[in-house]
Image: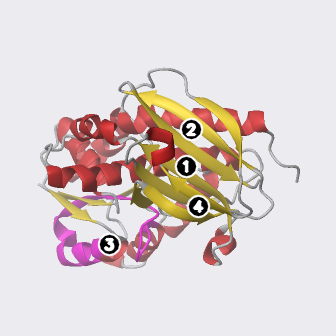
Amino acid sequence: MKKILVVDDSSVQRKMIIQIIKSAGFSNPTLEAEDGVKAIEIIGNDFQDIGLVLCDWNMPNMTGIEVVGALAKIPPLATLPVVMVTTEGTEAKISEAKRANPNLAGYVTKPFTPDRLKETISPILAKAN
Amino acid sequence: MARLDFQVIATTLLGAVNQAVNGFLHVHSDQEPTVVPRPLLAEDKWYVSSFGEFYDSSYISVIYFYRNSKDREANRFCGVFVLYLKEALAPNLIKAFGYKDTAETNNEVVADITAELANNIAGVFKKDLSGLGYPELEISAPMKFKGSAGWLSYPKNEKQYYRVTAFVWGQKFALDVMVAI
């Protein structure tokens, strides 16, 4: 079963997302990263076993937009499903994210309901699993 | 561009608070939040402390607003957000997020929840303002404090801020917002 990587500088937000994933019935193992640098390190080591990345935008050291942009430039990682989960909810930011990574699998704006997150990740995980 | 008037800011702020309380805390406010303008007394510095308001040591989170990314890089802010959550809310917050209630968990976790709530409110507020003629607004990462955030700077010539008062789980929480837009 593929792993899910949750990237957010807030430990509370990571915990909430993981709880929602589990309550949706997905028993995929989860990994956590508190910033983009850690996320890239984890992905670099484990990308073949990762089926989904949920990534915040505003983080210290390396932002989420930098992460998705970096992944898009590396062929084996360019098709890794990434969903941005962020307070950046304007059309301009959504477009910027899609330009950075044309394969972006989804975009969820905070604050989000559990159902909103579930409906975004369910088809991705169904395919990955 | 003319500055946004009080009604517009108030409506936008109240909407942001309700949306964040509902979407992030997964509760509804006990009563409709209110917003009132308050004068800024010093010229460009504001002493932020929860003791005067709540008579206790509250969790505080501070977020700065910038007109655009260039101003953000130059640290030229145009607004400040200060969220105060009373310590009495800690047990409800810890329970709501599924944490164990230990002395070690309390401070760190509640500070993080406060910061993330501030981030959610500020994010919605920023998004709504983008549709009101401020499409490039940026916000800082939330900063965490307990009891007091000390002296915060704000843009010179600003004379007032907005105090939002809301209630969850029977406890008051407050949000002070100063935006020079």
Mark 2 residue type: Ala
Mark 4 residue type: Tyr
Residue B40 lies left or right of residue A68; in this view the side is right
Count residues near mark 1 (Cα–Cα under 10 Å), then give few for <14, some for 14-19, many for 20+.
many
Seen at 63% across and 71% down, the residue is B72
Which label is found at residue B64? 4
Q: Residue furthest top?
A: B31
Real-space CA distance between mark 3 and mark 4, rounded to the nearest whole angstrom:
35 Å
Residue range highlighted in magenta: A38-64
Count residues near mark 4 (Cα–Cα under 10 Å), then give few for <14, some for 14-19, many for 20+.
many
Single out the mark in the foreground, 3 or 4: 4
* Pointers 3 and 4 in contact (C-beta within 8 Å): no
Single out the mark in the foreground, 1 or 4: 4
Seen at 58% across and 63% down, the residue is B152
Which label is found at residue B11? none
| Subunit ID for the residue under disc 2 | B
Label whose residue precedes the other's in the sequence (2 or 4): 2
| Subunit ID for the residue under disc 4 | B
Real-space CA distance between mark 1 and mark 3, rounded to the nearest whole angstrom:
33 Å
Which residue is nearer to you in this view: A105 or B104? B104
- Residue B38 in sight here: yes
- Residue A98, position in %: x, y? 52, 61
- Residue B103, position in %: x, y? 16, 50
- Label 1 belongs to which residue? B122
**Secondary structure type for disc 1:** helix
Mark 3 residue type: Leu
- Residue A109 in sight here: no
Real-space CA distance between mark 2 and mark 1, rounded to the nearest whole angstrom:
7 Å
Seen at 30% across and 66% down, the residue is A34
Which residue is nearer to you in this view: A45 or B111? B111
- Label 3 belongs to which residue? A77
